[in-house]
Amino acid sequence: MATSGSTVIRVFLSSTFVDFQEERSLLVKQVFPSLRRRARSRGVEIVDVDLRWGVTADQTERGETLPLCLAEIDRCRPYFISLLGERYGWVPPADPTYYKPALLERQPWLKERMGGASLTELEILHGVLRNPEMAGHAFFYLRDPAYAQAQPEPGWVANNLQERQRLTALKEEVRRSGFPVCEGLATPQAIAERIEADLWAVIEREHPEQEPQDPLQREEQRHSDYRRARTGLYLGGETAIAELEGWIEAGEQRILITGESGAGKSALIANWLETHQRSHPQDLVY
Protein backbone atom coordinates (compact mmCIF):
# COMPACT_ATOMS: atom_id res chain seq x y z
CA MET A 1 0.00 0.00 0.00
CA ALA A 2 1.12 3.51 -0.73
CA THR A 3 2.06 5.61 2.27
CA SER A 4 1.79 9.34 2.80
CA GLY A 5 3.80 11.93 4.65
CA SER A 6 0.72 13.91 5.51
CA THR A 7 -0.03 14.98 9.05
CA VAL A 8 -3.51 14.15 10.32
CA ILE A 9 -4.94 16.70 12.76
CA ARG A 10 -7.94 15.52 14.75
CA VAL A 11 -9.97 18.31 16.39
CA PHE A 12 -12.32 17.40 19.24
CA LEU A 13 -15.51 19.49 19.45
CA SER A 14 -17.03 19.84 22.90
CA SER A 15 -20.31 21.52 23.82
CA THR A 16 -23.75 20.86 25.16
CA PHE A 17 -25.85 19.43 22.36
CA VAL A 18 -29.32 20.96 22.10
CA ASP A 19 -28.23 24.60 22.12
CA PHE A 20 -25.24 24.32 19.78
CA GLN A 21 -26.64 22.33 16.88
CA GLU A 22 -26.50 25.28 14.49
CA GLU A 23 -22.87 25.99 15.31
CA ARG A 24 -21.97 22.32 14.91
CA SER A 25 -23.74 22.22 11.56
CA LEU A 26 -21.78 25.26 10.35
CA LEU A 27 -18.53 23.67 11.47
CA VAL A 28 -19.28 20.37 9.71
CA LYS A 29 -20.66 21.86 6.49
CA GLN A 30 -18.59 25.03 6.08
CA VAL A 31 -15.64 25.51 8.41
CA PHE A 32 -13.92 22.13 8.28
CA PRO A 33 -14.41 21.57 4.52
CA SER A 34 -12.83 25.00 3.96
CA LEU A 35 -9.93 24.22 6.30
CA ARG A 36 -9.38 20.84 4.66
CA ARG A 37 -9.14 22.37 1.19
CA ARG A 38 -6.54 24.90 2.33
CA ALA A 39 -4.58 22.54 4.57
CA ARG A 40 -4.03 19.80 2.00
CA SER A 41 -1.57 21.98 0.11
CA ARG A 42 0.53 21.90 3.28
CA GLY A 43 0.39 18.14 3.71
CA VAL A 44 -2.22 18.34 6.45
CA GLU A 45 -5.48 16.42 6.68
CA ILE A 46 -7.99 17.80 9.21
CA VAL A 47 -10.60 15.57 10.87
CA ASP A 48 -13.37 17.05 13.00
CA VAL A 49 -14.53 14.76 15.80
CA ASP A 50 -18.05 15.41 17.05
CA LEU A 51 -19.20 12.46 19.14
CA ARG A 52 -22.57 13.98 19.98
CA TRP A 53 -23.72 12.97 16.49
CA GLY A 54 -22.23 9.48 16.71
CA VAL A 55 -23.03 8.09 20.17
CA THR A 56 -26.35 6.28 20.21
CA ALA A 57 -29.01 6.29 22.94
CA ASP A 58 -28.27 2.61 23.62
CA GLN A 59 -24.60 3.38 24.18
CA THR A 60 -25.53 6.18 26.57
CA GLU A 61 -27.80 3.84 28.53
CA ARG A 62 -24.98 1.30 28.76
CA GLY A 63 -22.71 3.98 30.19
CA GLU A 64 -20.36 4.06 27.19
CA THR A 65 -20.57 7.78 26.42
CA LEU A 66 -18.08 9.05 28.99
CA PRO A 67 -15.28 6.54 28.32
CA LEU A 68 -15.72 7.00 24.55
CA CYS A 69 -15.46 10.78 24.86
CA LEU A 70 -12.39 10.68 27.09
CA ALA A 71 -10.64 8.17 24.83
CA GLU A 72 -11.34 10.23 21.72
CA ILE A 73 -10.12 13.41 23.42
CA ASP A 74 -6.82 11.62 24.03
CA ARG A 75 -6.63 10.63 20.36
CA CYS A 76 -7.25 14.24 19.30
CA ARG A 77 -4.62 15.82 21.52
CA PRO A 78 -3.59 18.56 21.49
CA TYR A 79 -6.54 19.97 19.49
CA PHE A 80 -9.69 20.81 21.45
CA ILE A 81 -12.54 23.24 20.73
CA SER A 82 -15.01 24.11 23.51
CA LEU A 83 -18.30 25.95 22.97
CA LEU A 84 -20.03 27.22 26.10
CA GLY A 85 -23.45 28.87 26.29
CA GLU A 86 -26.00 29.07 29.09
CA ARG A 87 -26.73 25.36 29.40
CA TYR A 88 -24.74 23.19 31.82
CA GLY A 89 -25.54 19.85 30.22
CA TRP A 90 -26.21 16.26 31.15
CA VAL A 91 -24.77 15.02 34.45
CA PRO A 92 -23.93 11.28 34.41
CA PRO A 93 -25.36 9.65 37.58
CA ALA A 94 -22.85 8.53 40.21
CA ASP A 95 -23.26 4.80 39.72
CA PRO A 96 -21.20 1.98 38.15
CA THR A 97 -23.22 2.07 34.93
CA TYR A 98 -21.64 5.39 34.00
CA TYR A 99 -18.49 5.30 36.14
CA LYS A 100 -17.29 1.78 35.55
CA PRO A 101 -14.50 0.43 37.78
CA ALA A 102 -12.12 0.10 34.83
CA LEU A 103 -12.71 3.74 33.89
CA LEU A 104 -12.10 4.95 37.44
CA GLU A 105 -8.92 2.91 37.58
CA ARG A 106 -7.64 4.62 34.42
CA GLN A 107 -8.92 8.06 35.44
CA PRO A 108 -8.93 8.20 39.26
CA TRP A 109 -9.60 11.98 39.23
CA LEU A 110 -13.18 11.21 38.16
CA LYS A 111 -14.02 9.87 41.63
CA GLU A 112 -14.26 13.37 43.12
CA ARG A 113 -16.52 14.53 40.27
CA MET A 114 -19.00 11.64 40.19
CA GLY A 115 -22.60 12.82 40.03
CA GLY A 116 -21.58 16.46 40.34
CA ALA A 117 -20.19 17.36 36.92
CA SER A 118 -21.76 17.41 33.47
CA LEU A 119 -20.31 15.47 30.57
CA THR A 120 -19.29 18.81 29.04
CA GLU A 121 -17.36 19.82 32.17
CA LEU A 122 -15.66 16.42 32.35
CA GLU A 123 -14.58 16.78 28.71
CA ILE A 124 -13.10 20.20 29.44
CA LEU A 125 -11.32 19.00 32.57
CA HIS A 126 -9.85 15.93 30.91
CA GLY A 127 -9.13 17.60 27.61
CA VAL A 128 -7.63 20.90 28.70
CA LEU A 129 -7.74 22.14 32.28
CA ARG A 130 -5.86 19.15 33.69
CA ASN A 131 -3.31 19.21 30.86
CA PRO A 132 -1.27 22.42 30.40
CA GLU A 133 0.49 20.84 27.40
CA MET A 134 -2.64 21.65 25.36
CA ALA A 135 -1.51 25.30 25.22
CA GLY A 136 -1.60 26.76 21.74
CA HIS A 137 -4.06 24.21 20.38
CA ALA A 138 -7.09 24.42 22.69
CA PHE A 139 -9.65 27.21 22.37
CA PHE A 140 -12.76 28.27 24.28
CA TYR A 141 -15.68 30.19 22.78
CA LEU A 142 -18.26 31.70 25.16
CA ARG A 143 -21.41 32.76 23.35
CA ASP A 144 -23.19 35.99 24.28
CA PRO A 145 -25.79 35.00 26.95
CA ALA A 146 -28.41 37.18 25.23
CA TYR A 147 -28.52 34.78 22.29
CA ALA A 148 -29.70 31.82 24.40
CA GLN A 149 -32.02 33.92 26.53
CA ALA A 150 -33.83 35.16 23.41
CA GLN A 151 -34.69 31.66 22.15
CA PRO A 152 -38.38 30.71 22.49
CA GLU A 153 -37.78 26.95 22.77
CA PRO A 154 -36.74 25.24 26.03
CA GLY A 155 -33.30 23.76 26.54
CA TRP A 156 -31.13 26.83 26.00
CA VAL A 157 -30.41 27.76 29.63
CA ALA A 158 -29.51 25.90 32.82
CA ASN A 159 -32.42 24.01 34.34
CA ASN A 160 -32.04 25.23 37.93
CA LEU A 161 -29.99 27.34 40.31
CA GLN A 162 -27.50 24.54 41.04
CA GLU A 163 -26.74 24.09 37.35
CA ARG A 164 -26.36 27.86 36.86
CA GLN A 165 -23.88 27.98 39.72
CA ARG A 166 -21.91 25.05 38.31
CA LEU A 167 -21.83 26.66 34.86
CA THR A 168 -20.68 29.98 36.29
CA ALA A 169 -17.91 28.24 38.23
CA LEU A 170 -16.82 26.32 35.12
CA LYS A 171 -16.61 29.49 33.03
CA GLU A 172 -14.56 31.21 35.73
CA GLU A 173 -12.18 28.24 35.85
CA VAL A 174 -11.81 28.44 32.07
CA ARG A 175 -11.07 32.18 32.22
CA ARG A 176 -8.38 31.64 34.87
CA SER A 177 -6.77 28.79 32.97
CA GLY A 178 -4.68 30.95 30.66
CA PHE A 179 -6.01 29.23 27.54
CA PRO A 180 -7.44 31.43 24.75
CA VAL A 181 -11.03 32.46 25.58
CA CYS A 182 -13.18 34.38 23.10
CA GLU A 183 -16.30 35.89 24.70
CA GLY A 184 -19.36 37.80 23.55
CA LEU A 185 -19.82 36.03 20.22
CA ALA A 186 -23.39 36.93 19.30
CA THR A 187 -24.33 34.46 16.56
CA PRO A 188 -23.50 30.93 15.38
CA GLN A 189 -21.90 32.37 12.25
CA ALA A 190 -19.61 34.58 14.33
CA ILE A 191 -18.48 31.58 16.36
CA ALA A 192 -17.86 29.51 13.22
CA GLU A 193 -15.81 32.25 11.57
CA ARG A 194 -13.69 32.78 14.67
CA ILE A 195 -12.99 29.05 15.01
CA GLU A 196 -11.89 28.85 11.38
CA ALA A 197 -9.56 31.82 11.82
CA ASP A 198 -8.02 30.42 15.01
CA LEU A 199 -7.44 26.93 13.63
CA TRP A 200 -5.99 28.25 10.39
CA ALA A 201 -3.56 30.44 12.35
CA VAL A 202 -2.28 27.30 14.11
CA ILE A 203 -1.91 25.43 10.82
CA GLU A 204 -0.06 28.32 9.20
CA ARG A 205 2.27 28.55 12.18
CA GLU A 206 3.09 24.85 12.44
CA HIS A 207 2.72 23.61 8.86
CA PRO A 208 4.28 25.97 6.30
CA GLU A 209 3.70 25.62 2.56
CA GLN A 210 5.37 22.58 0.97
CA GLU A 211 7.19 22.16 -2.31
CA PRO A 212 4.74 21.31 -5.14
CA GLN A 213 4.23 17.58 -5.74
CA ASP A 214 4.02 15.85 -9.08
CA PRO A 215 0.54 14.60 -10.14
CA LEU A 216 1.20 11.00 -9.08
CA GLN A 217 2.34 12.05 -5.61
CA ARG A 218 -0.71 14.26 -5.20
CA GLU A 219 -3.05 11.44 -6.17
CA GLU A 220 -1.28 8.98 -3.88
CA GLN A 221 -1.47 11.40 -0.97
CA ARG A 222 -5.11 12.23 -1.65
CA HIS A 223 -6.16 8.57 -1.42
CA SER A 224 -4.04 7.92 1.65
CA ASP A 225 -5.33 11.02 3.46
CA TYR A 226 -8.93 10.16 2.61
CA ARG A 227 -8.53 6.74 4.17
CA ARG A 228 -6.58 7.91 7.22
CA ALA A 229 -9.22 10.55 7.98
CA ARG A 230 -11.84 7.81 8.31
CA THR A 231 -10.00 5.38 10.55
CA GLY A 232 -9.70 5.44 14.31
CA LEU A 233 -12.73 5.46 16.55
CA TYR A 234 -15.22 3.35 14.59
CA LEU A 235 -18.43 2.35 16.30
CA GLY A 236 -20.79 -0.41 15.27
CA GLY A 237 -19.00 -1.78 12.21
CA GLU A 238 -17.28 -4.80 13.73
CA THR A 239 -19.86 -7.29 12.37
CA ALA A 240 -19.58 -5.92 8.84
CA ILE A 241 -15.77 -6.03 9.00
CA ALA A 242 -15.90 -9.68 10.11
CA GLU A 243 -18.23 -10.51 7.20
CA LEU A 244 -15.92 -8.82 4.72
CA GLU A 245 -12.91 -10.69 6.07
CA GLY A 246 -14.84 -13.95 5.85
CA TRP A 247 -15.70 -13.36 2.20
CA ILE A 248 -12.09 -12.49 1.36
CA GLU A 249 -10.82 -15.64 3.07
CA ALA A 250 -13.41 -17.65 1.13
CA GLY A 251 -11.95 -16.34 -2.12
CA GLU A 252 -14.62 -13.85 -3.17
CA GLN A 253 -13.37 -11.70 -6.04
CA ARG A 254 -16.09 -9.03 -6.09
CA ILE A 255 -17.87 -7.47 -3.12
CA LEU A 256 -20.48 -4.74 -3.35
CA ILE A 257 -20.94 -2.28 -0.46
CA THR A 258 -24.00 -0.12 -0.90
CA GLY A 259 -26.02 2.31 1.21
CA GLU A 260 -27.45 5.79 1.35
CA SER A 261 -25.18 8.82 1.24
CA GLY A 262 -23.66 9.37 4.67
CA ALA A 263 -24.35 5.82 5.85
CA GLY A 264 -20.65 5.16 6.44
CA LYS A 265 -19.51 3.17 3.39
CA SER A 266 -16.14 4.90 3.13
CA ALA A 267 -15.51 4.59 6.87
CA LEU A 268 -16.34 0.88 6.71
CA ILE A 269 -13.91 0.27 3.84
CA ALA A 270 -11.15 2.32 5.48
CA ASN A 271 -11.44 0.58 8.83
CA TRP A 272 -11.80 -2.84 7.20
CA LEU A 273 -8.54 -2.29 5.29
CA GLU A 274 -6.85 -1.09 8.46
CA THR A 275 -7.98 -4.27 10.24
CA HIS A 276 -6.99 -6.49 7.33
CA GLN A 277 -3.49 -5.07 7.06
CA ARG A 278 -2.83 -5.60 10.76
CA SER A 279 -3.72 -9.29 10.48
CA HIS A 280 -2.32 -9.82 6.95
CA PRO A 281 0.76 -7.55 6.71
CA GLN A 282 2.06 -9.54 3.72
CA ASP A 283 -0.95 -8.65 1.53
CA LEU A 284 -0.63 -5.92 -1.09
CA VAL A 285 -3.69 -3.63 -0.99
CA TYR A 286 -4.39 -1.12 -3.72
Image (cartoon, helix red, strand yellow):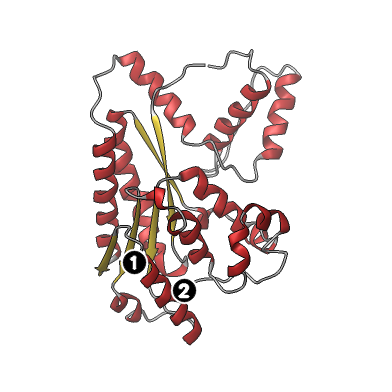
Q: Which structural element holds mark 2?
A: loop
Residue in the picture at 33% in, 58% down:
179
Check the image and report above or below for 220 versus 121. above
5 relative to 269 in the view: left or right: left
User: 242 or 183: nearer the eye?
Assistant: 183
User: 41 or 244: nearer the eye?
Assistant: 41
Q: Where in the figure is residue 269, as x and y percent of width and height?
A: 57, 31
Q: CA distance from mark 2 to mark 1?
A: 19 Å
Which picture quadrant has residue 143? bottom left
Q: What amino acid does circle 2 point to? A: Tyr
277 relative to 8 in the view: left or right: right
- Which label was assigned to residue 176? 1
Q: Where in the figure is residue 109, as x and y percent of width and height?
A: 58, 61
Count of all numbered marks drawn on residues in the image: 2
Res 156 visible: no
Q: Where in the figure is residue 285, as x and y percent of width and height?
A: 57, 17
Residue in the picture at 53% in, 35% down:
231
Q: What amino acid does circle 1 point to? A: Arg
Q: Which structural element holds mark 1?
A: helix
Q: Identify the residue under disc 2.
A: 88
Residue in the picture at 31% in, 15% down:
215
Res 243 visible: yes
